[in-house]
Amino acid sequence: MTHPASPWSDPATETEPVAYAGPPVSAPPPQPYPGGWAPPGYGWPPQQWPTYGPPAPARPRRPGQVVAAAVLSFVQAAAVALSSAYLLLLASTFGFLATEFGGDAQADALVTEATVVTVVQLLSAVALVVGGVLVLNRRGRGTWATLVAALGVQLALSLYWVVRLSTLDGFSDDVVGPAAVLVVGVLFFTAAPAVALGLLLVGPVRRWAAGTDEAVRR
């Protein structure tokens, strides 16, 4: 049994050329989705994403005075740590010499006083660093009060040194003597905490710490 011959299998069959009209249309053109965006494959990524609810509120802006006060606190902490190390070395040397020459009650009292003051100053330097880091990373009245207290301790220490050095023998007689130079140095180290404390006590910083500056946004 033979199958009838197909005209497409015959090489001698002539065919008429047909113009290529492109692939068949399988689906209607995509319609824009509500909100002005389209699914993947049709102009992706979308020009506008759909929104759900109101936008998130902006965070309160940290005043520049806070950053400046924190930087001054770090500088003051470094200066206090350096001066405390020098004071401890001086007290140890003075105590060793006093012991070698038979000891003296007044010398022992000065060494003890210098050691106690050194420990207090080192603790105040740590408080300055902690307070500066807190105000830079956390907003609140507690962090603000921590740095204010640390700066207040620096002013108290400066006052102590001014009074203590002014009671040294020969200070009143020789105004330009070594003790007077030390007092000027103490006043110089008072400048940084005094400026930082003034920056923290201005109105915008206090409102920022208390959370009542809702109008200031970024």
Image (cartoon, helix red, strand yellow):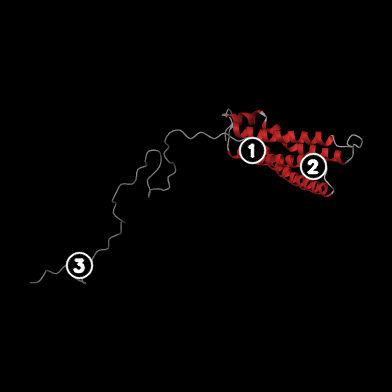
Using residue 36 as the reference point, say whether residue 162 is left or right of it.
right
Using residue 48 as the reference point, say whether residue 190 is left or right of it.
right
Q: Indicate the amino acid at tag 1.
A: Gly
Using residue 86 as the reference point, say whether residue 123 is left or right of it.
left
Q: For the residues carrying marks 3 and 2, which lies nearer the camera in this image?
A: 2
Q: Position of residue 69 (x, y in %)?
A: 68, 37
Which mark sits nearer the N-terminus, 2 or 1?
2
Q: For the residues carrying marks 2 and 1, which lies nearer the camera in this image?
A: 2
Q: Nearer the viewer, residue 33 or 27?
A: 33
Q: Position of residue 198 (x, y in %)?
A: 71, 32
Which mark sits nearer the N-terminus, 1 or 3?
3
Q: Indicate the amino acid at tag 3.
A: Trp
* SS assignment at label 1: helix
Q: Quadrant of residue 162?
A: top right
Q: Nearer the viewer, residue 146 or 137?
A: 146
Q: Residues within 10 Å of mark 2 (few under 14, many from 20)?
A: some
Q: Residues within 10 Å of mark 1 (few under 14, many from 20)?
A: many
Vertical order, 41 against 173 (above or below): below
Dot 2 corresponds to which residue?
108
Q: Indicate the amino acid at tag 2.
A: Asp
* SS assignment at label 3: helix
* SS assignment at label 2: helix
Q: CA distance from mark 2 to mark 1?
A: 35 Å
* 1 and 3 marks in contact (CB < 8 Å): no
Dot 3 corresponds to which residue?
8
Q: For the residues carrying marks 1 and 3, which lies nearer the camera in this image?
A: 1
Dot 1 corresponds to which residue?
131
Which residue sits furthest right? 173
Q: Nearer the viewer, residue 34 or 89?
A: 89
Vertical order, 204 against 128 (above or below): above
Which mark sits nearer the N-terminus, 3 or 2?
3
Q: Which mark is residue 18?
A: none
